[in-house]
Amino acid sequence: MEIRNIAIIAHVDHGKTTLTDALMRQTGAAVEGITMDSNNIEKERGITIYSKNTSIEYKGTKINIVDTPGHADFGSEVERVLRSIDSVLLIVDAQEGPMPQTRFVLKKSLELGIKPIVVLNKIDKPAADAARAEEQVLELFLELGASDEQADFTTVYAIGRDGIAARTLEDMPNNGGSSRDLTPLLDVILEEVPSAATPEKIAAPLRIQAFNLGYDNFLGRLAIARIYEGTVKGTQNVFVKKPASQSASGEIETRSGKLTKLFTFKGLERVDVPEAQAGDIVLIAGLPDIYIGETIVGDQTTEALPAIAIDDPTITVNFLVNNSPFAGREGKYVTSRQLREYLERELEVNVGLKVDFVSPDAFKVSGRGELHIAILLENMRRNGYEVQVSQPQVIIKEEAGQKLEPFEEVTIDTPSEFQGTIIERLGTRGFVLQNLTQNDNQVRLLLEGPTRGLLGYRNQFVIDTKGEGILSSRVIGFKPYAGEIKKRQVGSMISMAPGKALGYALWGLQERGTLYITPATEVYEGMVIGNTSKGEEMMVNPTKGKNLTNVRSSGNDEAINLFPPFTLTIERGLEIMAEDEYLEITPESVRLRKQYLNESERVKARNKAAGK
């Protein structure tokens, strides 16, 4: 059978997964209601976090499809997948045009010599402008140094939600055309994507590279891998070659192993097969210590494939054992040994993550962004872990005596009335406006600045644009340190007493700032229950009740009207926390607390830091 291998890449929410689901339904690989977003967090948030593969059959050809995440924080998922495929479907929203992650994923695919197929999706949107979007895509190709062949891309127009595609706009149903399904897109894939299985590759010595990992309760660790050359049998002796960049010795290391099971994909299901040939994407069992990027060969003398290169992390967070007064109440796994074991397992599959096990009770975790760290923490709490984390800090490098920090390119779409506020706020955070384009009442701002300036801004952005703005960013590399940035304009409202918060006490406090808790919430000394709008730290007693007397007066009883609290989530907590605070995360709760719970201890720590 002919084989084609493609990945679907795009900016977040441009319709990758929806289009993949529609392709599976049309070819009979899945039924209505089955989706690639199988993870609970993905279903809740409506975004793809982990790359997944499926396969469909069309006109006697097997098409392996890898669906990739669209958020920049999960770029490492995209980087390793691109090595395993032969072409990409670049999905672009016909209204929004190319966005930051579009640039990131396209740059990676062009560097690997891949010729993309461009799919202009959501052309039924009222403000969609397919001609403008296509022109912007071409400009992006040329800007990223695409070859003449790559820039001569094929464009397909689609409405992924309805499962309709066409080669020209005139063929779309909304223009009176005859297209009613995704057949034109499938035909383009067969025409444009090179065959992955050629006689020369099948006859060559066996070479397989793992680009993802899975786990089965009966089979143990599984490797999702591309067979580049040769034929592999379900039970055969092999050699595994670890790249020099991953080995402790700095040289390629070889070890032996034996495969026990071999699977290929049919839709979202895995099918047990006796053997598979070059070009296919398979699931391999029997290698309990296989890692992403390692090469599996049949002959010890066969050369290993190049290692999969991943961009460096940009932010770091300290993970610590939870030692708050409420520690151990909700979590099943609370010790440093259990945290270490979880992070070690995570490192095997999360290649964009780095962990420095600096001490028995503290682990320095580096990731690609706040969302990357937040999803890791969300998975931990859902698995019964308790942990507390410090404020995210950017990773500072030093090269040739110069201090460097990560910079980001930010793209903002917003109604024009808010552009002044946005430019002013980001200007104080070290960002410089690069470009401004206006389309009716909407403006698109392009700014560049340090990642430090973006930490903690997204929540303020939602307030400044009244929820009507869209902010996207991508890391553009390390640049000279941008100097001091003034960000935090609010202070902390700190509980000075343990107990249950009372409505009467919170009613008196809500005018001083924004509360994070509701009445009847249990608090402890040193817990941050809200922020103060004037920027000072304030010790408060949220457990204080109303003084009662036996004298009744009509003027004494006032109605207590409480504003809805600012509910803490992991992402919000990481954004708003101060440098001397911890975010306490348990299976049921997210709390903000001071590192030193007692006020006198906090004063001593401040004096020590100031050198007094």
Image (cartoon, helix red, strand yellow):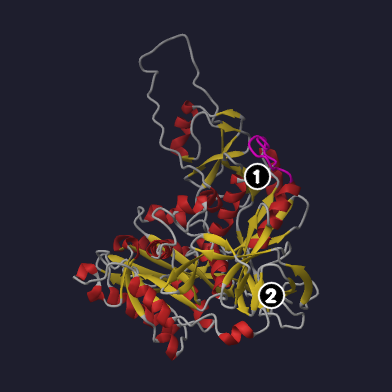
Badge 2: residue crowd in 10 Å (few <14, some 14–19, many ≥20): many
Observer-nearest of 34 and 578: 34
Which residue lies at the image location 43% right of the left edge and 61% below the top edge?
425
Residue 480 in the image, given as x and y percentages of width and height:
59, 75
On whether residue 333 falls in the magenta region, the answer is yes
Q: Mark 2 falls on what kind of element?
A: strand
Residue 254 in the image, given as x and y percentages of width and height:
78, 75
Q: What residue type is disc 2 on?
A: Thr
Earlier sequence position, callout 2 versus callout 1: 2
**Residue under numbered circle 1:** 385
Report if residue 583 is visible in the image. no
As drawn, the residue found furthest toward the left would be: 176
Q: What residue type is disc 1 on?
A: Tyr
**Residue under numbered circle 2:** 295
Is residue 164 left or right of 605 when viewed as pictured? left
Is residue 594 left or right of 129 when viewed as pictured? right
